[in-house]
Amino acid sequence: MTMSLSAKDKATVKAFWAKISSSGEAIGADALSRMLVVYPQTKTYFSHWKDMSPGSAPVKKHGATVMGGVAEAVAKIDDLTAGLLSLSELHAFTLRVDPANFKILSHNILVVLAIMFPTDFTPEVHVAMDKFLAAVARALSEKYR
Amino acid sequence: MVKWSDFERAAIQDIFSKIDYDVVGRAAFSRCLIVYPWTQRYFGSFGNLYNAAAITSNPKVAAHGKVIMAGLEKALTNMDDIKTTYKDLSVLHSEKLQVDPDNFNVKLFSFYCLTIVVAGQMGAAFTPEVQGAFQKFLAVVVASLRKQYH
């Protein structure tokens, strides 16, 4: 399903991101923690970590890395495919993350946003963020085959 | 037969004891119609679903949110045999309502919207482990609803 981002979606995402970006690391750490607990099959990608428990050092560090990528995506929202090219190559050739997992992480990011920003995470923001994260996932999948 | 750990049982019961069914049912069902607008196809008789504001203030949406929560409560009170409890509901969804069973699955109402709304209601108490228990409960509900399709 290719549903492109409207001008309204982009504006909504940028405005919401401006409010939440200072909590980026916390969002990433919590989303990743949830993914590893609720979808234990995702742990297979992190067997090299000493500690995969919620809030552990590797989880926090990696959560920050992931949200750094999301921040980059917000900045390049007008052309995600071009903007996320090197990240796509990384995921396709080096990390080889099964793209099905992008949906899983996206869901957990949305859960964290609902918890951390209950008033700001309105249904309108929810749909815009859901579309945005799906578009980011698509851009990351570009180079897979 | 699904096995529930003591933690899972307690976590799920705790969630349902804490949430306001009317608020959660309406909010989750509204989000489903807003975030996945193609689901509106089943609700042609609901009147104005034109935009988010119309959906969230639509009384039929609120009423239907309650119906869905009542259905989930049936599963809650029969956690050890949701499959049998849901037999008639499954037949209803497949034969009378003809809902595409993909609509129950991963993305939509069950997993995503309801989990997100409950998370917002419970805040930090909705820990990763509690989320896991709740999503497992919804997975069993979804599988039971799909059971009678052919």
Image (cartoon, coloured by chain):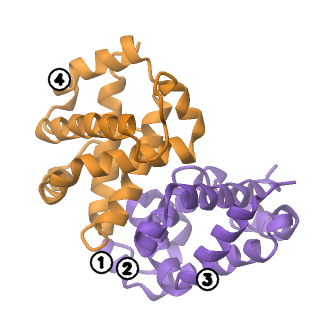
Chain colours: A orange, B purple
- Which chain's residue wears label 3? B
Q: Mark 4 and mark 1, same subunit?
A: no
Q: How many marks?
A: 4
Q: CA distance from mark 4 to mark 1?
A: 35 Å
The residue type indicated by label 2 comes to: Thr
Tell me which residue sits at (49%, 84%) in the image.
Answer: B62
- Which chain's residue wears label 2? B
* Neighbours of disc 3 within 10 Å: few (<14), some (14-19), many (20+): few
Measured from the top left, where is residue B118 in percent x and y? 49, 70
Which of the 4 quarters of the picture holds residue B95?
bottom right
Q: Nearer the viewer, mark 3 or mark 4?
A: 3
Q: CA distance from mark 3 to mark 1?
A: 29 Å
Mark 2 and mark 3 lie on one chain; the one further toward the N terminus is 3
Which type of secondary structure does the marked residue at label 3 adopt? Answer: helix
Front-most of residues B73 and B16: B16
Which type of secondary structure does the marked residue at label 1 adopt? Answer: helix
Q: Are marks 4 and 1 in contact (CB under 8 Å)?
A: no
Q: Nearer the viewer, mark 3 or mark 1?
A: 3
* Neighbours of disc 1 within 10 Å: few (<14), some (14-19), many (20+): some
Mark 3 and mark 1 lie on one chain; the one further toward the N terminus is 3
Identify the disc placed on residue B17.
3
Q: Are marks 2 and 1 in contact (CB under 8 Å)?
A: yes
Q: CA distance from mark 4 to mark 2?
A: 37 Å
Identify the disc placed on residue B56.
2
Measured from the top left, where is residue A132 in percent x and y? 28, 45
Q: Mark 3 and mark 4, same subunit?
A: no
Q: CA distance from mark 2 to mark 3?
A: 24 Å
Per the image, the residue denoted by label 1 is B53
The residue type indicated by label 1 comes to: Ala
Q: Mark 2 and mark 3, same subunit?
A: yes
Q: Is residue A92 left or right of residue B83?
A: left
Per the image, the residue denoted by label 4 is A82
